[in-house]
Image (tube, helix red, strand yellow):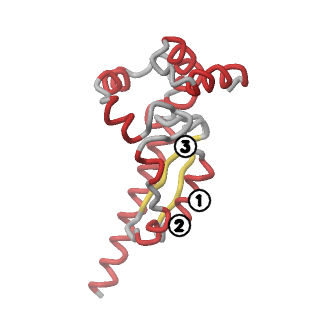
């Protein structure tokens, strides 16, 4: 993001001025449209979901800022528990995701039976803005898991 825009957003956040219309005027085109959903216009399902967003719960968990978690999730850390997950797991992220793709790949590396996919043209909503890649990789993962199960079942029956 443009450093001047980040500075303006941070200044509003430092002043706890989240209700200032300028805050969303800066966030929507510079953050949400770049890192949340890159399609223009947004799909109807995204707009519908956001129109029903419970901001009380969202702010309780995330906090009012999209740049720093200040809600209850700020102290929620289950990194040590990732090794306990044994089921096949696909960790999906995207180049323009709000979650750092390198972190998602690290997270997948901590899971015993996992793989990761980074959608090259996607954002946090890559199931919409990088659909072909997203669903190709998802279907590929599901087929691989099904084949592994079939192979294991065949071994058990022999």
Helix, strand or loop at mark 2: helix
- Image point 40% across, 22% down: which residue? 43
- Image point 28% across, 25% down: which residue? 52
Residue 88, position in %: x, y? 41, 65
Residue annotated with mark 1: 106
Q: CA distance from mark 2 to mark 3?
A: 17 Å
Tag shown at residue 153: none
Query: Which picture quadrant has residue 147?
Result: bottom left
Say whether disc 2 or disc 3 marks the residue closer to the N-terminus: 3
Residue 10 higher or lower than 19, as above or below: below
Residue annotated with mark 2: 110
Q: Is residue 3 rendered to the left or right of residue 112?
A: right
Circle 2: is it few (<14), some (14-19), or many (20+) Cα within 10 Å? some
- Give the position of the N terminus as an image quadrant: top right
Q: Which of 37 and 53 lies nearest the eye of the viewer?
A: 53
Tag shown at residue 99: 3
Helix, strand or loop at mark 3: loop
Circle 3: is it few (<14), some (14-19), or many (20+) Cα within 10 Å? some
Q: Residue furthest right?
A: 3
Query: Which picture quadrant has residue 9?
Result: top right
Residue 130, position in %: x, y? 51, 34
Q: CA distance from mark 3 to mark 1?
A: 12 Å
Residue 56 higher or lower than 151, as above or below: above
Residue 63, position in %: x, y? 44, 36
Q: Are marks 1 and 2 in contact (CB under 8 Å)?
A: yes
- Image point 49% across, 62% down: which residue? 79
């Amino acid at each position: 993001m443009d450093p001047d825009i980040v500075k303006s957003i941070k200044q509003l956040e430092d002043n706890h001025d989240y209700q200032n219309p300028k805050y969303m005027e800066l966030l929507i085109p510079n953050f949400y449209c770049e890192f949340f959903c890159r399609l223009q216009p947004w799909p109807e399902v995204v707009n519908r979901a956001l129109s029903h967003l419970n901001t009380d719960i969202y702010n309780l968990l995330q906090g009012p800022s999209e740049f720093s978690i200040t809600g209850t999730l700020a102290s929620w850390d289950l990194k040590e528990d990732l090794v306990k997950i044994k089921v096949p797991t696909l960790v999906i992220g995207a180049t323009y995701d709000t979650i750092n793709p390198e972190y998602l790949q690290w997270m997948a590396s901590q899971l015993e039976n996992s793989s990761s996919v980074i959608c090259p043209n996607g954002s946090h909503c890559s199931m919409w803005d990088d659909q072909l890649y997203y669903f190709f990789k998802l279907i590929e993962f599901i087929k691989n898991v099904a084949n592994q199960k079939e192979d294991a079942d065949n071994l058990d029956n022999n």
